[in-house]
Image: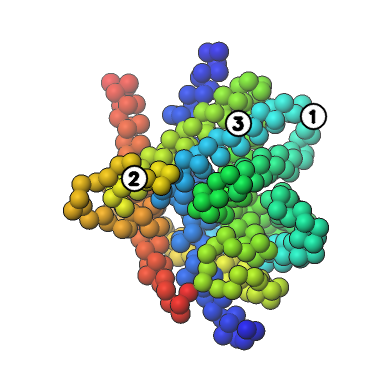
């Protein structure tokens, strides 16, 4: 099972075919909230990739070595995972502020927002306690698979966010009927973009 | 009592979380492909919202401002766990349909947003009104969307295993309404419609 192609398929499946934003609707708040300018979209994407990888690794370890063996996972996983993510984001923020101010300036302000980004909690839950996303993939993740999966999901998030931001910048100057201007038109555009992703369904048997 | 009603009505109309404030969208768009699932989702959100609002309002004088967000999240997560275990034990088919959306109620912006914006500054009684109003406002839009999507997208509405409403035979349902892109596009038009209604009523008042 541990071949390059297996990891590649897992990555493509997580990033494109089961894109978390456009085919699962997870993380939409930040999707519509920060897709106003290319700079913020870049900062947010970088921060999400970073936090999602770290959060998924941590929750995977906690589930495997603490919650599952002690048999308390079934009713403690929600508070445990969300607290892990919140604490982790706080630590990352403090560490970045001390160690690399340049990086902190680039993505620091997006870090607190990520705590309530459902995409991070969804990916962390899926890798530790698989079965929520009905993916045509093996249903228990090893640590390596968990990392690749989280990377794929976050890259897919960033990719969709950047595409949508580029579209929205063009939309501002387009002649749109008055009632549809702003949010309604953004939703319709997102629908069309999501249609493109639906077209990918079934590739490689995923 | 008058104040209570005013707060309750706010959530239903002028501060409706979905069509006006645009928060809590993820769950709405994902769950609204079925009336049955939406019904349970709405009840779950109302329960968590009312309970967490009430508890936070009760504790608002002892929660220190610096660490309020983690405390809110833990309170919300506990109530979500109650819903999670309850649905898993008594309604397994519904739990299978809603799946990841139950744990994700924790990060639903509506609940944390109301805790921060309302329950932390108001009495228990008013916070319950706010929770009920916001929760029902949310469920109302969710059920409306689900009704349109399931009726026109699949041709019938199923509740607890039996079809309650059917389109005439020969109706060919546009499947896109049941799929993800359809949800985005339909919601775009719903928001535009609500905006048009609001604009018209303010114009009438001005005239």
Could you say which is closer to the camera, residue B105 or residue B111? B105
Taking the spot 50% from the left edge, 41% from the top edge, the residue there is B40
Q: Quadrant of residue B174?
A: bottom left
Q: Chain of mark 3?
A: B
Q: Which residue is mark 2?
A: B163
Q: Residue at x 22, y 56 (%)?
A: B172
Q: Are marks 3 and 2 in contact (CB under 8 Å)?
A: no
Tell me the residue that label 3 is attached to.
B50
- 1 and 2 marks on the same chain: yes
Q: Earlier in the sequence, mark 1 or mark 2?
A: 1
N-term mark: 3 or 2: 3
The residue nearer to you, when weighing A40 against B99, is: B99
A125 over B3 or under it: above or below: below
Horizontal and vertical percent for residue A91? Answer: 78, 57
Choose mark 1 or mark 2, whichever is in front: 2
Are discs 1 and 3 both within one chain? Answer: yes
Q: Is residue A205 above or below residue B96?
A: below
Q: Secondary structure at mark 3?
A: helix
For mark 1, what is the residue? B62
Task: Work out whether mark 1 precedes mark 3 in sequence or the reverse, and give the earlier one.
Answer: 3
Query: Relative to B186, is A74 on the left or the right?
Result: right
- In the rendered image, residues at marks 3 and 2 fall on the same chain: yes
């Amino acid at each position: 099972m541990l071949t390059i192609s297996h990891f590649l398929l897992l990555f493509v499946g997580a990033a494109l075919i089961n894109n978390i934003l456009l085919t699962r609707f997870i993380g939409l708040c930040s999707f519509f909230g920060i897709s106003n300018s290319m700079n913020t979209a870049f900062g947010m994407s970088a921060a999400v990739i970073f936090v999602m990888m770290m959060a998924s690794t941590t929750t995977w370890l906690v589930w495997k070595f603490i919650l599952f063996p002690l048999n308390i996972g079934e009713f403690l996983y929600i508070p445990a995972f969300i607290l892990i993510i919140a604490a982790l984001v706080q630590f990352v923020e403090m560490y970045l502020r001390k160690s690399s101010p340049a990086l902190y300036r680039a993505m620091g302000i997006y870090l607190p927002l990520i705590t309530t980004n459902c995409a991070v909690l969804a990916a962390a839950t899926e890798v530790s306690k698989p079965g929520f996303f009905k993916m045509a993939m093996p249903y228990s993740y090893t640590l390596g698979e968990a990392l690749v999966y989280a990377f794929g999901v976050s890259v897919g998030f960033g990719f969709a966010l950047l595409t949508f931001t580029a579209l929205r910048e063009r939309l501002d100057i387009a002649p749109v009927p008055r009632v549809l201007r702003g949010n309604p038109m953004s939703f319709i555009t997102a629908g069309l973009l999501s249609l493109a992703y639906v077209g990918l369904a079934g590739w490689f048997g995923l | 009592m008058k104040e209570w009603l005013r707060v309750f009505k706010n959530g239903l109309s002028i501060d409706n979380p979905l069509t006006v404030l645009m928060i809590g969208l993820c769950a709405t768009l994902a769950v609204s492909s079925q009336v049955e699932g939406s019904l349970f989702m709405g009840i779950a959100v109302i329960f968590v919202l009312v309970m967490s609002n009430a508890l936070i309002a009760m504790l608002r004088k002892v929660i220190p401002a610096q660490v309020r967000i983690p405390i809110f999240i833990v309170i919300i997560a506990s109530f979500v766990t109650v819903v999670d275990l309850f649905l898993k034990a008594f309604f397994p088919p519904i739990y299978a349909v809603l799946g990841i959306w139950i744990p994700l109620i924790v990060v639903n912006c509506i609940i944390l947003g109301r805790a921060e914006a309302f329950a932390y500054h108001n009495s228990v009684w008013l916070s319950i009104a706010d929770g009920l109003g916001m929760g029902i406002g949310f469920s109302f839009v969710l059920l409306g969307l689900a009704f349109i999507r399931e009726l026109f997208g699949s041709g019938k509405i199923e509740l607890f295993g039996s079809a309650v409403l059917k389109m005439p035979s020969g109706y060919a349902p546009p499947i896109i309404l049941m799929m993800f892109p359809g949800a985005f596009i339909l919601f775009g038009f719903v928001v535009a419609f609500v905006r048009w209604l609001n604009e018209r009523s303010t114009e009438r008042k001005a005239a």
